[in-house]
Amino acid sequence: MTEDRSGDVIVVGSGVIGLTTAVVLAESGRRVRIWTREPAERTTSAVAGALWWPYAIEPQDLARTWALRSLSVYEELAERPDETGVRMVEGVMGGTLMDEHAPWATARLPGLRASTADEYAGPGLWARLPLIDMPVHLGWLRARFLRAGGVVEERTVTDLGEARARAGTVVNCTGIGARELLGDTGVRPVRGQLVVVENPGLRTWLVSEDAESGTTTYLFPQPGGLVLGGTTEADAWSLEPDPVVAADIVARCAALRPEVAGARVLGHRVGLRPVRPAVRLERDASAGGGEQGVLVHNYGHGGAGVTVAWGCAEVVLGLVPR
């Protein structure tokens, strides 16, 4: 007798989007398995900065809704930072004006204000935001998923048909992998390179946008070191750190915070952000249904996957049948 799998869910992908989605589904009572080519600690999510902020993501209005829902979750998780990897940290978003983010942010972020000249040489916003230590957070998400009865299987997926034959619902959280898996050429890699150095004592984060050069420079104090960034190289696929780029990142950060100059380098990180003209978060009508089951897509979040993960996961929950 064939086992009934119609109520099962397979989530393909184990980055922060896939893991968070799987957690929400498993805790709702679904039988959930994650199929992943590589463990979470080797995904793009593991090398993210990762500051909560709806960065370069469309559609903007929906992204802000997803982000604010996620913010509520992160505020709760920040009460247990050693366990969850989430801390609420103060810092300045340089080059950003207050009126660009009212009222969506001002109504939700207590104390959001224009930065002072002592905090940043130019216009900027001071804010207290979630800053996530991704290796810790991904490990915590995986453990929470397993506690909810979930199962993780490491396997390479080349055709979603295989997953759809094994479960009533498949949720595609493959990020940049959707380009090849679905032939979605709208998904493009935007390469990001980071340098991790010994923290010379910085306790606040800083993001500085240079409109003329198109660069964004940032410093994120994490428990394992000070994370320096970054780059936004469209259509670049290399995962090898470029020493010239690394030196430029350190120089840019030192120009903002001179104490960084000469800090001992602890490591280099490279990741490919899955950028798309708009996030694909929907039930796939072209995939049929009935005996074929349901296919839901949740990918294309660019550099804002951490920011919107919980909000998007709750949308997926509403799209998955019981």
Image: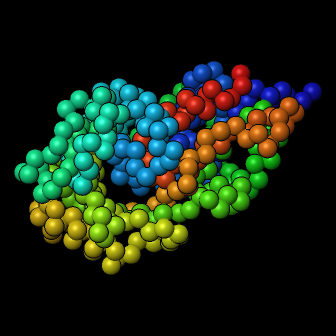
Residue depicted at 43% across the width and 37% down the height: 64
Q: Residue furthest front?
A: 99
The image quadrant where one finds the N terminus is: top right
**Toward which corner of the image does residue 307 lie, by quadrant?**
top left
Q: How far across and how far down the image is residue 155, in percent?
A: 68, 51
Residues 150 and 193: in front is 193
Against 261, residue 82 (above or below) is: above
Residue depicted at 87% across the width and 33% down the height: 291
Q: How far across and how far down the image is residue 265, in percent?
A: 25, 66
Position of 77 with respect to 172 (left or right) is left
Against 102, residue 4 (above or below) is: above
Residue depicted at 75% across the width and 26% down the height: 7
Q: How is the image coloured?
A: rainbow
The image quadrant where one finds the C terminus is: top right
Residues 278 and 321: in front is 278
Q: How far across and how far down the image is residue 287, in percent?
A: 80, 43
Position of 256 with respect to 318 (left or right) is left
Q: Residue furthest left?
A: 118
Against 218, residue 295 (above or below) is: above
* Residue 90 appears anywhere in the view: no
Residues 239 and 83: in front is 239
Against 263, residue 291 (above or below) is: above
